[in-house]
Image: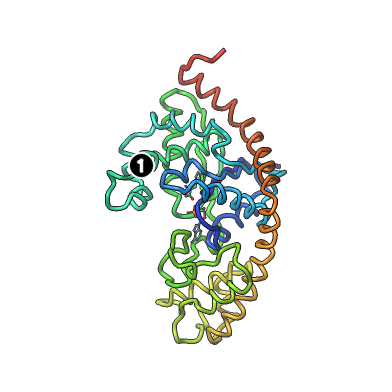
Amino acid sequence: MSRGRILSGIQPTGNLHLGNYLGAIRNWVALQQDYECLFCIVDLHAITVWQEPKELLRSTREVAAGMIAAGIDPAANALFVQSHVPAHAQLAWVFNCIARLGWLNRMTQFKDKAGKDKEKASAGLYVYPNLMAADILVYKATHVPVGEDQKQHLELTRDIAQKFNNDYGMNFFPLPEPVIRGPGTRVMSLRDGTKKMSKSDPSDFSRLNMTDTADAIAQKIRKATTDPNPLPDAVAGLEGRPEAENLLSIYAALTDGTLEQAVAETAGWTFSQFKARLTEVAVAVLGPIDAEMARLMADPAEIDRVLARGAAKARSIAEPILAEIYATVGFLPPH
Ligand code: AMP
Ligand code: TRP
């Protein structure tokens, strides 16, 4: 039945938005039919940059609620918090000793997140990719659904797996493959069609949050940046119109269609006509998720129980694999 084992991760930082839903969570929901899945809320990764403790705690539960509300089945998969499975951090240390400085120095996410003054970045931010490799390989996962932005980290994961296999002369780790699928892999800001929709954008009008009310969704779409022309009758007509392209791509993703279909359906419409239609479909998709999230968040103890079960399942897979790795490295088994 199972074609392989999937692991993916999401950081519990800030609000979940449409980019997270269309670019990540929705794909995970689809993949759970065909794979054994582990979905990890990566709190250890989150603190590589400063997190307000209360916010981190709230976000951790909110991400869990968002994933369940969007259709992740926590009974069929392992949905868990990274810090609940110590084997991730334990294997990350081994990988700190496998990965080469030269490899880490090439990582573009570090360069982006560290900003101008790299001396002030945390050491954790630098070794972030080694922990991500550990997240994946501690389960010997074969497939990793990620956005384009994470492909480089996945290549590093494969390099680490390969070097471990070579150094210890065994074929221990599989080389995990990225799974990148469907439209909506890159959702752009509602204010600026050339910028990625992001939790860290200071303007809340730049994104649709999974917890936005129908009114908020309508208002944000109404205020979304556009150009003065009607919608084109062919995809080629979107050239140089990033906002139109983004809104149509969002519409295509939300209606499970292609960009070509969305353009054909809306050819010649004014933006105000199109925005009314986009609002309808956004509310139809996000509304029920938001309602379910609110219901789940009203009972945090139940979320914690679900996450505890997920962690127990994850530990039962990770611990024997970690024990084999420790023995391979030559660590004396504890008695
Ligand atoms: P992040 O919010 O950066 O922690 O990302 C969590 C997941 O959502 C990752 O798999 C990202 O690739 C995905 N993601 C975040 N922002 C977007 C976006 N604007 N468009 C598509 N996918 C996104
Ligand atoms: N680095 C990923 C991101 O920022 C999150 C992540 C951590 C992850 N560990 C992972 C993704 C393992 C896939 C697999 O989106």
Residue at x-position 43% and y-position 30%: 93
**Quarter the C terminus occupies:** top right
Q: Which residue is mark 1?
A: 122
- In this rendering, is residue 183 above or below 31? below
Residue 324 appears left or right of 70: left
> Is 265 placed above or below 102 here?
below
Q: Where residue 255 sits: x, y (%)?
A: 63, 70
Q: Is residue 95 above or below residue 128?
A: above
User: Foreground: 165 or 19?
Assistant: 19
Q: Residue 63 at what x, y percent from top left?
A: 59, 52
Ligand 2 closer than 8 Å to the CB at disc 1?
Answer: no
Which residue is outermost to the top? 335
Image mark count: 1
User: Looking at this view, is 301 or 103 the one in front?
Assistant: 301
Q: Foreground residue, 19 or 146? A: 19
Classify mark 1: helix, strand or loop: loop
Q: Residue furthest front?
A: 54
Q: Nearer the viewer, residue 281 or 237?
A: 281
The N terminus: image quadrant: top right
Position of residue 182 in the picture relative to residue 151 (left or right): right
Residue 44 image offset from top left, x and y in percent: 49, 40
- In the image, residue 306 lies at what x, y percent? 69, 43
The coloring applied to the image is rainbow
The residue that appears at 40% across and 77% down in the rendered structure is: 240
| Residue 184 in the figure: left or right of residue 118 | right
| Three-letter code, disc 1 | Ser
Q: Tell me if mark 1 has few (under 14), some (14-19) or many (20+) residues whose alpha carbon lies within 10 angstroms of its own.
A: some
